[in-house]
Amino acid sequence: MFKQVAEIISYNIFQMDGLKYIIPLSETKEKVIHEEISLFDEDDDAEAVTWVTKPGKRVKVMNWSKNKMEFFDKELA
């Protein structure tokens, strides 16, 4: 278990968000505005604002024993 924890910490320091297993700052939030048009002449049209989170890019690491790049979270799924 200590080896797994140490591995996650080392990857977190060098190249990934260790809680989400994504590249740091690759997750984005978008503001989506839904406007509702009124049938009557009112100046204050209602707007509904929602935030949509787009997932970040998955981290790939080098598996030196197989000599190829692999997704870090493939064993966790």
Image: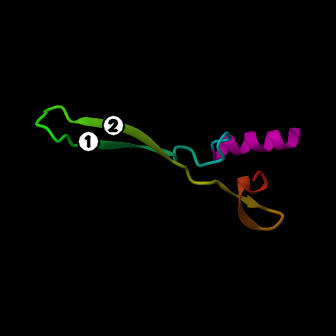
- Under mark 2, the amino acid is Ala
Locate residue 34: give its quadrant: top left
On the image, the x and y values in percent for residue 1 come to 89, 40
Locate residue 70: give its quadrant: bottom right
Answer whether labels 1 and 2 touch (C-beta < 8 Å).
Answer: yes
Mark 1 vs mark 2: which is more N-terminal?
1
On the image, the x and y values in percent for residue 63 come to 77, 61
Secondary structure at numbered mark 2? strand
**Crowd band around label 2 with a 10 angstrom C-alpha radius: few (<14), some (14–19), many (20+):** few
Residue located beneath label 1 in the image: 36
User: What segment is highlighted magenta in the picture?
Assistant: 1-16
User: Is residue 12 found inside the magenta-colored segment of the image?
Assistant: yes
Magenta stretch, main secondary structure, is helix
- 68 or 46, which is in the foreground? 46
Task: Tell me if 64 is positioned left or right of 32 in this view.
Answer: right
**Crowd band around label 1 with a 10 angstrom C-alpha radius: few (<14), some (14–19), many (20+):** few
